[in-house]
Amino acid sequence: TGQFDAIPTGRNLFCAGHIQLQDGRLLVAGGHVQAYEGLKDTNLFNPQTSSWQRGADMFAARWYPTVTGLPDGRVLVASGDAISFANHQNEDVEVPLRIASQTTPEIYDPAANTWTQLPAATRTMALYPFIFVLPDGRLFDAGPERMTRTLDLGTGQWTDVGASPIDGMSAVMYRPGKILKAGTWSDPEFPGREATNRTARIDMTASSPAWQEAASMRYRRSYNTLTVLPDGKVLSTGGQRGTDGIDETTGVLPTELWDPDTDTWKTMASSHRPRLYHSSALLLPDGRVLLAGGGAFGNAKNER
């Protein structure tokens, strides 16, 4: 019918992380108490019954965590806990790490409804890191911190891969083991930065992986979202030229399409509304891409 149904959880899921489990349920990890203070919640939505249920609590309360599906059906949650604030005037600290998480990752087993911590993998991480499962089973943290790393789940050890030329606002795995990221990482805490149109990619299946500058988008973007399409091309939607997340007059409406075979961007149709802070773009089963969200505070309109 194209209509939305309200199915309340009774919990504040703002600033959580989420992923679809292999059995079709949606797992939502963490939530919101106040800025930088999250919840230990595990909330599970069953689309067959349109109902929510509580799972086992995480060991740590999380706000802005990333949830990554593992090949065996379990999920890894990282970041969003023990958030620390670096000196904003310290230029030696990367902007994405000026508000960071002293995180201990943990793994959820949906079959057993249990969490297991990975204490050996504890390190400082940016909030909402870009984490992907590589073909060989390792996890790859592609940013937004410039130094990127792999995680061996067997040992819990991180290994440096190398620094990327940009931090990036969004990242995707467009081919197995091949990552693209684009734009400038932004948070409303850090307005006044100038967004970039630069992009970077890396092939983690190569013998010596290294980040390379890829073709630049036509438009400078922060708060943009990259979406992999069924043919392996990548769509860049939304965002703004600034970094405050709320000034819709700086919103970027044109969509751009990246072809990895030719390393070229093509400008596509414009969206009707700007999509900035807390917006999303999601590939649908029929090949369309759903743009949603944006707003939340200040002068920004809450996009429903």
Image (cartoon, rainbow, N blue to C red):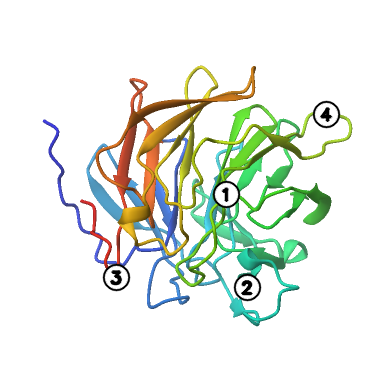
Q: Quadrant of residue 207?
A: top right
> Badge 4: how crowded within 10 Å, few (<14), some, or many (20+)?
few
Q: Earlier in the sequence, mark 3 or mark 1?
A: 1
* Badge 4 vs badge 2, beta-carbon distance below 8 Å: no
Residue 285 relative to residue 118: left or right: left
Q: Amino acid at mark 2?
A: Arg
Depth order, front residue of 2/151: 2
Residue at mark 1 to residue at mark 4: CA–CA distance: 27 Å
Dot 2 or dot 1: first in sequence order is 2
Using the image, determine if residue 129 lies above or below residue 237.
Answer: below
Per the image, the residue denoted by label 2 is 98
Query: Gap between marks 3 and 1, in whole Å?
Result: 24 Å
> What's the amino acid at mark 4?
Ala
First reached walking from the N terminus: tag 3 or tag 2: 2
Q: Nearer the viewer, residue 115 or 232?
A: 232
Give the secondary structure at mark 1.
loop
Q: Which residue is mark 3?
A: 298
Eye-nearest disc, 2 or 1: 1
Mark 4 or mark 2, which has the lower sequence index? Answer: 2
Distance of label 3 from label 2 (alpha carbons)? 22 Å
Q: Is residue 197 left or right of 117 when viewed as pictured?
A: left
Can the viewer see residue 211?
A: yes
**Viewer-side label of 4, 2:** 2
In percent of width and height, residue 14 lies at 35, 63
Outermost residue to the right: 207
Q: Quadrant where the N terminus lies?
A: top left
Q: Nearer the viewer, mark 3 or mark 2?
A: 3
Q: SS of the residue at dot 3?
A: loop
> Residue at 42% of width from left, 60% of height from top?
16
Considering only order in the chain, which callout, 4 or 1, is on the residue closer to the N terminus?
1
| SS class, disc 2 | loop
* Three-letter amino acid code of the residue under disc 1: Thr
